[in-house]
């Protein structure tokens, strides 16, 4: 009978550690819970006393306490400069009850969640509302909850990777979203806009499924579109297609926040991008704070310490797991990128191999001469792509291993070195750091590059040997090269004498220089930009790789 274990009309006042000294190593001591009981019931075993606030103050002991009071209970009110100068009504969305409050008002709604969209639609649907505006700081992805009258959106977007259980690695790599993002963006484009379903305003920068919280309160979207669609012929066409020509507009203030309230009239809201809106009412659909006032400070601090420990990897599994996932993601991305780059650069790699072959025999061969020699072979122009298959196939695991191990090691080495030799040292005698954090970061990157390249060399050498034999014209196909090598020299032919060591001597300095250069460019150029740019990142990688290749060329020959 669970009813005897449930108490209504009780307010929890405090939950504290029941141990004598305020600290404990485990939960043996339990917890002391104080609550105010407003029921008119008989006294129980708890220690009770009447209070001026009403009810009976009770103190009880429990071995374990589960806090299930929810997160959305304390409204979050953003700080707005001179908000006290506003002469209208300010209301948090938690206090909203009825759309009649919008009558004869100019309404400004703050927020980009479903509550903000719901309230904005209620306001614009009130015939006597003068005007409505929505202030969105970042943007959102708007998709209707139902695609058809009786079919929710979720039943249309399942794919191969949708299943009951999702391993944390699969979730971190976002495999389930890769395919559906392409399909959804095409679908959105056919629906009038690639920003969202019939969404022309308040969009996120890049639409990717799985990267954004979908806003399924879609009714207000058509009203938000009106001011923007009216500006173009194509927009007016889609207004006609969706039957939006008669709708009252909702004005949007996107990627901006309130800067101040005009003190002259007390109703003009000024945004930090220079725009303004005259309002009689501001509705703050700004969410909630996570507040647990009944928990003691000691318990709160205990949970903060445990969270930080897991997040930073300080003895917990969180840091290691994060480093592993970072390594896996970099491994997958770099493997695919390597296959693409090998395909694009295959002709130049073949020309380089032929030039080296002739150079070893004492004959210098220019670029055009090398091209002429290659295309005169049996397959003509396609000889420039000799060994592409084995090269691309081999580059994926080797480069994937290289960058995966590098990324994992860097995520592991940097905090380790800083906590052991750098600014994070926590010795009792307050010993000063042995090295600066910048020096330790440089050492970590160099060591990570060396470890990553060493591991990758063992998978790279066999493919390189086969590729170079094909590029030199010694065999007509990959199968012919492999079978001939096994038949004549055995499997050891894939690992020629000194092959791995030579590869390491050549590539480890190249890897260290390239990655140090790349990380330097990222820290001092790419990440200095106000807005992240993949083109800057690509340029940084190209410059670092080009300098590294120039230095590596003598060893490559």
Image (spheres, grey):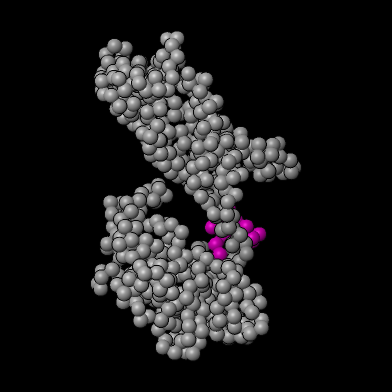
Name the residue: 66% across, 41% down: 437
Name the residue: 55% across, 38% down: 518
Q: Is residue 27 magenta?
A: yes
Name the residue: 40% across, 73% down: 230
In this image, 394 relative to 433: left or right? left
Snapshot quadrant of residue 463: top left
Does residue 449 appear in this view? no
Magenta stretch prevailing secondary structure:
loop
Percent position of residue 555, x then y:
51, 20
Name the residue: 30% across, 27% down: 381
Percent position of residue 21, x then y:
66, 59
Q: Which of the two residues, 65 or 239, is positioned nearer the viewer here?
A: 239
Image quadrant where one finds the N terminus = bottom left
Percent position of residue 80, x then y:
62, 73
- Count of all numbered marks drawn on residues in the image: 0
**On screen, residue 498 above or below 386:** above
Residue stretch in magenta: 18-31
In this image, 127 relative to 73: left or right? left
Snapshot quadrant of residue 390: top left
**On screen, residue 496 above or below 1:** above
**On screen, residue 336 above or below 72:** above
**On screen, residue 274 above or below 348:** below
Percent position of residue 29, x then y:
56, 60
Q: Is residue 534 magenta?
A: no
Does residue 131 appear in this view? yes
Q: Which of the two residues, 526 or 296, is positioned nearer the viewer here?
A: 526
């Amino acid at each position: 009978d669970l009813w005897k274990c449930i108490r209504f009309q009780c307010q929890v006042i405090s939950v504290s550690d029941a141990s004598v000294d305020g600290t404990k190593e485990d939960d043996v001591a339990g917890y002391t819970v104080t609550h105010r009981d407003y029921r008119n019931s008989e006294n129980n075993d708890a220690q009770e006393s009447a209070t001026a606030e009403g009810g009976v103050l009770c103190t009880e002991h429990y071995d374990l306490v589960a806090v299930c009071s929810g997160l959305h209970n304390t409204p979050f009110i953003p700080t707005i400069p001179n908000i006290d100068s506003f002469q209208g009504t300010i209301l948090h969305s938690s206090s909203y009850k009825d759309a009649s409050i919008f009558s004869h008002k100019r309404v400004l709604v703050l927020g980009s969640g479903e509550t903000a969209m719901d309230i904005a639609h209620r306001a614009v649907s009130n015939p006597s509302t003068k005007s409505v505006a929505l202030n969105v700081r970042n943007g959102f992805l708007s998709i209707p909850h139902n695609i058809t009258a009786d079919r929710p959106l979720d039943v249309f977007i399942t794919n191969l990777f949708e299943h009951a259980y999702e391993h944390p690695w699969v979730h971190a790599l976002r495999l389930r979203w890769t395919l559906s993002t392409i399909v959804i963006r095409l679908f959105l484009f056919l629906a009038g806009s690639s920003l969202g379903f019939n969404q022309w305003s308040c969009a996120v920068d890049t639409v990717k499924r799985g990267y954004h919280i979908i806003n399924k309160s879609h009714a207000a979207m058509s009203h938000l579109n009106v001011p923007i669609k009216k500006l173009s012929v194509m927009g007016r066409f889609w207004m006609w297609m969706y039957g939006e020509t008669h709708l009252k507009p909702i004005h949007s203030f996107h990627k901006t926040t309130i800067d101040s309230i005009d003190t002259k009239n007390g109703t003009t809201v000024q945004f930090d991008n220079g725009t303004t809106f005259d309002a009689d009412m501001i509705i703050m659909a700004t969410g909630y704070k996570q507040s647990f006032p009944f928990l003691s400070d000691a318990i709160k601090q205990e949970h903060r310490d445990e969270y930080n420990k897991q997040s930073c990897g300080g003895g917990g599994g969180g840091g290691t797991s994060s480093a592993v996932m970072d390594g896996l993601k970099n491994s997958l991305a770099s493997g695919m990128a390597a296959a693409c780059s090998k395909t694009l650069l295959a002709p130049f790699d073949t020309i380089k191999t032929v030039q080296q072959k002739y150079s070893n025999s004492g004959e210098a061969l220019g670029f055009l001469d090398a091209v002429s020699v290659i295309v005169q072979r049996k397959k003509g122009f396609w000889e420039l792509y000799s060994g592409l298959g084995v090269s691309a196939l081999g580059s994926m695991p080797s480069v994937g291993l290289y960058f995966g191990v590098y990324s994992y090691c860097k995520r592991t080495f940097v905090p380790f070195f800083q906590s052991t030799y750098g600014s994070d040292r926590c010795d009792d005698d307050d010993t000063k750091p042995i090295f600066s954090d910048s020096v330790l970061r440089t050492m970590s990157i160099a060591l990570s590059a060396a470890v990553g390249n060493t591991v990758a060399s063992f998978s790279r050498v066999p493919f390189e040997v086969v590729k170079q034999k094909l590029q030199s014209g010694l065999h007509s196909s990959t199968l012919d090269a492999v079978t001939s090598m096994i038949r004549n020299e055995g499997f050891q032919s894939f690992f020629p004498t000194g092959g791995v060591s030579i590869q390491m001597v050549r590539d480890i300095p190249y890897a260290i220089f390239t990655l140090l250069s790349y990380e330097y460019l990222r820290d001092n150029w790419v990440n200095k930009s106000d807005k992240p740019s993949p083109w800057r990142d690509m340029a940084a990688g190209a410059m670092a790789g080009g300098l590294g290749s120039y230095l590596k060329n003598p060893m490559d020959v």
